[in-house]
Image (cartoon, rainbow, N blue to C red):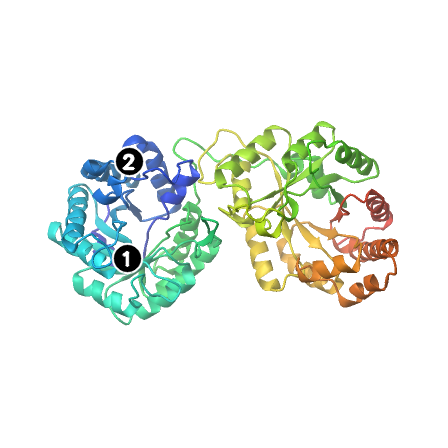
Amino acid sequence: MRKPFLEQLEQRVLVADGAMGTMLYARGISIKNCFDELNLSQPQLVREIHQAYVQAGADIIQTNTFGANAIRLGRFNLAGKVAEINRAGVQIAREAAGDDHYVAGSIGPLGVRLQPLGKLSFAEAHACFREQTEALAGCDIDLIVLETFGDLNEIREAIFAVREVCHLPLVAHMSIDDEGRSLDGSSPVEFARRLTEWGADVVGVNCSVGPVSMLEALEKMRHATAKPLAAQPNAGKPRNIDGRNLYLVSAEYMADYSRRFIDAGARIVGGCCGTTPEHIKWIRNYVRATTPGKKRLEVNIQALENAGILAPIATAGRSRLARKLVNREFITLVEILPPRGSDAGKELASARLLIDAGADAINIPDGPRASARMSNLALAVMLQREGIESVLHYCCRDRNVISMQSDLLGGYALGLRNLILITGDPPKLGNYTDATAVFDIDSIGLTRLANNLNRGLDLGGNAIGSQTGFLVGVGANPGAPDLEEEMRRLRLKIEAGADYVVTQPVFDLKLLESFLEQMRDFRVPVIAGIWPLVSFRQAEFMQNELRVAVPEAIRERMRAASTSEAARQEGLRIALEMLSSIRPRIEGVQISVLGRNQAALELLRAAQKIPVVAH
């Protein structure tokens, strides 16, 4: 049985759950829906998300009632169901939490401006908060959490309303901007003092920003209040890309900052928008490691009740390409762009020519440079039907997580087995500047998604009844301006389930050697990109706009070519020299020739002649 909440908080740090809205959206619920109403119409869906957070190690489960006040519900003609929706939210959370976890009644802001900036009076706001509190406090909850408030006047009325109704422990969160100020301009010191004076038992910050800004705010707050602190950041600061939010922070990064939150005085740590059970699992492990007298407990996300995680298919059994990688055979991939129209005859003929010349597989980019072409998934399926092994580039730019899962499951059912997962170019780099991007997740999250599918789970950790057997590749840039950050992200991709790495085109041997030296600990095959240059202008473009390092000596060689044909020949010589130099250090090459079959054939022949050195 659980101890009284505040008593337990004195003894150890507690972990709150993560985002409810993010998880509902991932399950196919439109953002236009009333999430709180799902407590009535789809209680099992809400319960499953609560259960996922319990299984991930959360101590505190927050009810799905963030917007269950009369004003927000009124937008959906549900103002008369405040009590019913809140009571149902508590019942669902308690069923998932059981007797060993705390249930927090969640109350969010009203979603309208209070006087003097808006029409809503303090008395009207107070009455709304009181109505919701009465519904929550009359059920089996352990505490109340005020979340994501940006206006001190509004949270004051919420605190006063809660205290009029009950004496349950009260956690009061403010939402902050990059400078640590609440949305009404109050500093962390000011709002920490005010929340303490008004009667909050725990003072915290949630939402709005990622871990860095939140840590800075906490460090200021601890000097302004003796109350315990709470921190529940987003999975990175939300980056708005054409009306959509992009969250980039990994679970490990969130967990590392949770440890810093604890050092700054936090007694409750968790997550907000963009966080998932995976983030909470990592946070829980860090918290256990910092709790005196407690042994660190590894908590793994489980499939939902009565459904088990499937053991991944052995790597060698996933595809011909996978078997060659496992057997340490040298791999040659050749990149072919999808056609601009609906006729793929030329591409299929080129693929057959290259396979017959010794290529192991054809790699197909996904909307290269954000341009409109035939679906690369369609071309990959055409190749597979011709008996040609294909490798599908798949990027995060154009799809939400629901369609990503659908595409990958459909592609697997149609015979696709090999992937290279990338974040993708923003559309404004391409030829449709008004196109919008999605970027629900980045390549790290996409790798985790694919790895989940390989274990028979969706992104939320729910069993899907069968599994995929993808060979999962990821990209890397040995010439990245910040190689330390590139390697940090690459490590996260590998930990998320990547089986091999494909580099961007390599022209600088020193950079590649440095990259490969740092790759030693990762123990995954590296396939290096080879791209025969065709002009000095292309070399300049790659250096300055694609952030691919092209040494000055290489650029000068291309500049010295007197004609277009001389430049193409010089670019091919450079590529052959590079291939000869790097072949003993890598497990394969990816040849990108943009339709120049003769250049690809020469590089394939060279790759087969150069002896492999054991490494």
Within-10-Å neighbours for mark 2: few <14, some 14–19, many 20+:
many
Q: Residue at x 34, y 69 (%)?
A: 219
Q: Is residue 417 visible?
A: no
- View extreme (bottom): residue: 223
Q: Name the kind of residue labelled 2 in the image.
A: Asn
Percent of width and height locating residue 451: 54, 41
Q: Find residue 393 and name its label.
A: none
Nearer-the-camera pick, 144 or 245: 245
- Quadrant in which the N terminus is drawn: top left
Q: Are marks 1 and 2 in contact (CB under 8 Å)?
A: no
Image position of 478 (left or right of 43): right
Identify residue for label 1: 173
Image position of 154 (left or right of 15): left
**Is residue 169 placed above or below 325 in the rendered structure?**
below
Question: Could you say which quadrant of the image residue 267 lies in?
Answer: bottom left
Label 1 vs 2, first from the N-terminus: 2
Percent of width and height locating residue 536: 79, 60
Q: CA distance from mark 1 to mark 2?
A: 24 Å
Within-10-Å neighbours for mark 1: few <14, some 14–19, many 20+:
many
Q: Number of numbered discs present?
A: 2
Q: Residue at x 17, y 42 (%)?
A: 135
Identify residue for label 2: 39
Q: Name the kind of residue labelled 1 in the image.
A: His
Q: Residue at x 43, y 50 (%)?
A: 279
Report helix, strand or loop for mark 2: helix
Percent of width and height locating residue 383: 71, 32
Report helix, strand or loop for mark 1: strand
Q: Residue at x 43, y 31 (%)?
A: 307
Image position of 353 (left or right of 85): right
